[in-house]
Image (spheres, rainbow, N blue to C red):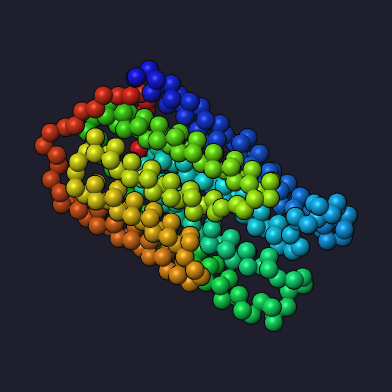
Amino acid sequence: MIGFFRRVVAVYDSLEHIWEHKRTERAAANLLIAAFLGSLALIELARQGWLPEAVAELMPKSHFYAINVAFSMLLGIEVFGLVFSLANSVSDSVGKQFEILSLILLRHSFKEFIYFNEPLVWEQASKPVLHIISSAGGGLLIFLLLGMYYRLQHHRVITQTAVATADFIASKKIVSLLLLLIVSGIGVLQGYYFLTGQTAYDFFSIFYTVLVFSDVLLVLISLRYSSSYPILFRNSGFAVATVVIRLALTAPPYLDVLLGVGAMGFAIGITIAYNRFEKTAPPPAVPEVGVPLYIDVPKP
């Protein structure tokens, strides 16, 4: 069994190395540019009647839809970055979730434009402009609060030995790899629905639902290495913040921003309380020892 875990972690390390490589970053950027320009071109060809009728009927009529396509793909890339961040630290992965939420709110602003005719006129834009301002303002506020959130993080090691730390990191890598497989499967299935003309579901709502369960699993796994009350409360509280983010994705306009900003404030409050609690809490009397699944250089 230990050998199997080592092979799984080795697969994760290889995938993470590929994902974080500069060539992968450039390839992803080139893909986004190609998707954006390609969408603009196809929409224009459909508007001019230069595409087969069956294809033209499936194409949107507004050029603004190309922005939605590019942002959706960008968010998909950010999702993979979030999955890989789970193996680093709980606080960093939570911060990544809020980064994605802020981008989703910005995408909501652009999505309002796809229902407009071209060129834009005020009579048509006056009603949804409040939704646009609300979503964009909410994304900006979360962006500002994220700066405070990251500054508050101290990245303390919750384990007492290097062996236990390596074991904990290996456990998180296994969970991340499992989540990566699930996310990939959801994406492939959604792509199939889109290509076959079936009703596609909200990818990000389903992803955050799965993320809630993975966060709870990580909380339970962390108990193997530390049952400290402040650590348990902090990690459990972060899992609650993930649930609120999930609710924000399906909430109506205005309420989605309130839930998102509220979840961000809750995560900041947990971090402040945790930092103050750790300053006054006595150190553990007995060091905790773990059996390593995979020995690696611990990350801070």
What residue sits 31% from the left and 33% below the top? 168
The total of numbered circles placed on residues is: 0
279 shown above or below 136: above
x, y (%) of residue 181?
50, 35
113 shown above or below 188: below
What residue sits 69% from the left and 46% below the top? 195
Judged from this view, the residue extending furthest toward the bottom is 123
272 shown above or below 23: below
Horizontal side, residue 289 vs residue 192: left or right: left
Residue closer to the observer: 272 or 44: 44
Quarter of the rendering containing residue 50: bottom right
x, y (%) of residue 37?
75, 52
x, y (%) of residue 239?
34, 51
Judged from this view, the residue extending furthest toward the left is 285
Judged from this view, the residue extending furthest toward the top is 3
Residue closer to the observer: 149 or 231: 231
252 shown above or below 247: below
Quarter of the rendering containing residue 108: bottom right
In which quadrant is the C terminus drawn? Answer: top left
Horizontal side, residue 171 vs residue 134: left or right: left
What residue sits 43% from the left and 21% below the top? 7
Residue 147 can be seen in this image: no
